[in-house]
Amino acid sequence: MEDGGVWALRLHPVHQIRIRICDLSSINEIKSFTTRFSSMNKPLHVLVNNAGFLEHKRVTTPEGLELNFAVNVAATYTLTELVMPLLEKAAPDARVITVSSGGMYTEPLNNNLEYRESDFDGTKQYARNKRVQVALTEWWSEKYSNKGIGFYSMHPGWADTPGVSKSLPGLSEKLSGNLRSNEEGADTVVWLALQPMDKLVAGAFYFDRAEAQKHLKFAGTAASHAQIGSIVDSIRSICGLQPPMRR
Ligand SMILES: NC(=O)c1ccc[n+]([C@@H]2O[C@H](COP(=O)([O-])OP(=O)(O)OC[C@H]3O[C@@H](n4cnc5c(N)ncnc54)[C@H](OP(=O)(O)O)[C@@H]3O)[C@@H](O)[C@H]2O)c1
């Protein structure tokens, strides 16, 4: 399967790909999607939380959520929690891979999840969201440590995608010709999905097939991870999820 350092996906004709569409900016849609998906009662081996979004203006969804937060945080949390019983069916080899970003290095965890300050800054909000994903991954890993589910977050590197050219045109232009291909960006995701679990570090942040630091020296972000418990409570309340059951 490995091809020049990049994983290439070649499916045998007996493998079937089924596509289901869900608007991840809507908590209600995620809830109906997971209800339908769960009714198949099949083990879920790998969940990749890849969908990501950067909107520069402060926009609210019809459900009243700030849009970046809705897609990057509320959806990641709600979808993962609601499919947890299916992941448990695939234990001890189930995993959740959340595609975060190196952009998170600049921001500590912040309990102002929907960025209610008047000086809304979409890039900063995106970085805050990506920090939440890294801290959530750590939190899940501790909370569900006995469930046989591996939780990992990762940075794909800067890749030439429609999202980057639309939301970060300056970066796209500056790095023109040096951005990664889609395959290179996806490489560590596929690698994390295929590695034996005992070779991976639970709750870790990965970059280029290796564990990477979650905090830069002197960035002052490390202590903020202590807030993750209360942040999870806030996300659950915003998303209308019941308090976590004792597992
Ligand atoms: N590219 C990079 O350099 C880079 C760097 C760091 C991190 N990342 C992360 O990598 C991930 C993929 O980003 P990308 O660069 O490939 O961005 P992209 O080209 O904009 O792709 C984003 C993906 O998210 C999906 N998505 C967005 N909003 C959605 C919604 N409301 N419901 C369902 N799906 C939705 C999009 O689906 P549609 O196509 O249907 O809209 C698309 O498949 C993101 O989490 C991003 O934060 C990317």
Image: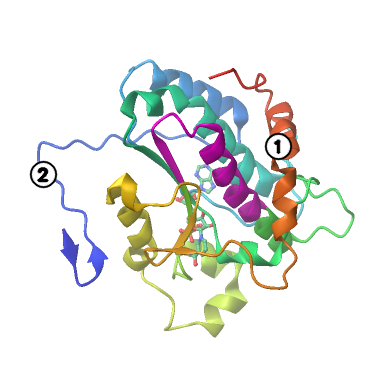
Q: Is residue 151 left or right of residue 101?
A: left
Does mark 2's beta carbon lie closer than 8 Å to ligand 1?
no
Q: x%, y% of residue 69?
A: 67, 45
**Dot 2: few (<14), some (14–19), or many (≥20) neighbours within 10 Å?**
few
Q: Earlier in the sequence, mark 2 or mark 1?
A: 2
Q: Label 2 belongs to which residue?
A: 12
Seen in the image, is 130 located left or right of residue 224? Answer: left
Q: Which mark is residue 229?
A: 1
Q: Is residue 24 visible?
A: no
Tell me how far mark 2 sits from mark 1, CA to CA: 43 Å
Whether residue 110 can be seen here:
yes
82 in relation to 50, above or below: above
Residue range highlighted in magenta: 129-151
Q: Amino acid at mark 2?
A: His
Q: Is residue 96 above or below residue 146?
A: below
Residue 25 is situated, as x and y percent measured from the top left of the image, at 60, 39
The residue at the point 70 percent across, 37 percent down is 229
* Tag 2 secondary structure: loop
